Image (tube, rainbow, N blue to C red):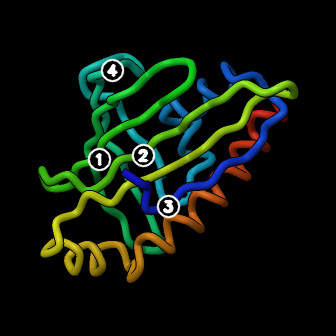
Amino acid sequence: MTPDASAHIDVAASPQRVFELVSDLRGLSRCAEEYSGGKWLNAAGPRVGARFRGLNKRGWRKWPTTSTVTDCSATRFAFEVKSLGMAVSRWQYDIEETGEGCRVTESTWDRRPGWYVPVTRLATGVRDRAVTNQRNIEATLQRLKQAAESA
């Protein structure tokens, strides 16, 4: 299935360094556009099946989510997001080694049921989630590149 939003960036850092940033809740919050932090619920860190409570922020609006890690390897970190117990999205970071470091691809899939879309528009202030996520991904990847390369 094609993602609703996706972009990639080349990073002059090791794939391991990038994986550490995207799989660390604090590291990811420093790079991400809306995600502002989280806490592991049933694990001390990232692993398949680990769940975390995330807090997202856009302007004055804030909303919590609960995510479950579905992929946790040197080449992919991904998680499924729920809000109020409903599947709302999937986020995925693919890390591919290159001669100069790695290429990181961030993708997301919108999983919200149709009836829930207007509710989330009110809660988040986002009218077009795909367009906003595309912009957010591009901004996040730029910050991720800066963080990984400055380490």
User: In this rendering, which labeled residue sits more in front, label 3 or label 2?
Assistant: 3
Q: CA distance from mark 2 to mark 1?
A: 8 Å
Q: Secondary structure at mark 2?
A: strand
In percent of width and height, residue 33 lies at: 56, 59
Q: Residues within 10 Å of mark 3 (few under 14, many from 20)?
A: many
The quadrant holding residue 41 is top left
**Relative height, residue 79 to residue 101 (above, below):** below
- Sequence-first disc among 4 and 3: 3
Residue 5, disc: 3
Given the image, on which type of amino acid does mark 4 rest?
Val
Confirm or deny contact between disc 4 and disc 2 (CB under 8 A). Answer: no
Residue tagged 1 = 81
Which residue is labeled 4 in the image? 48
Q: Residue at x 69, y 43 (%)?
A: 144
The earlier-in-sequence mark between 4 and 2 is 4
Q: Residue at x 31, y 18 (%)?
A: 43
Q: Residue at x 21, y 55 (%)?
A: 83
Whole-number angstrom distance, CA of label 4 to CA of label 2 = 14 Å
Specify which label sits upstream in the sequence, 3 or 2.
3
Q: CA distance from mark 3 to mark 1?
A: 15 Å
Question: Along the horizontal axis of the image, is 39 left or right of 130?
Answer: left
Q: Which residue is mark 2?
A: 91
Judge the density around disc 4: few (<14), some (14-19), many (≥20) Cα neighbours within 10 Å.
some
Q: Amino acid at mark 1?
A: Val
Q: Amino acid at mark 3?
A: Ala
Q: Are marks 4 and 3 in contact (CB under 8 Å)?
A: no
Q: Is residue 43 left or right of residue 100?
A: left
Q: CA distance from mark 4 to mark 3?
A: 23 Å
Q: Residues within 10 Å of mark 1 (few under 14, many from 20)?
A: many
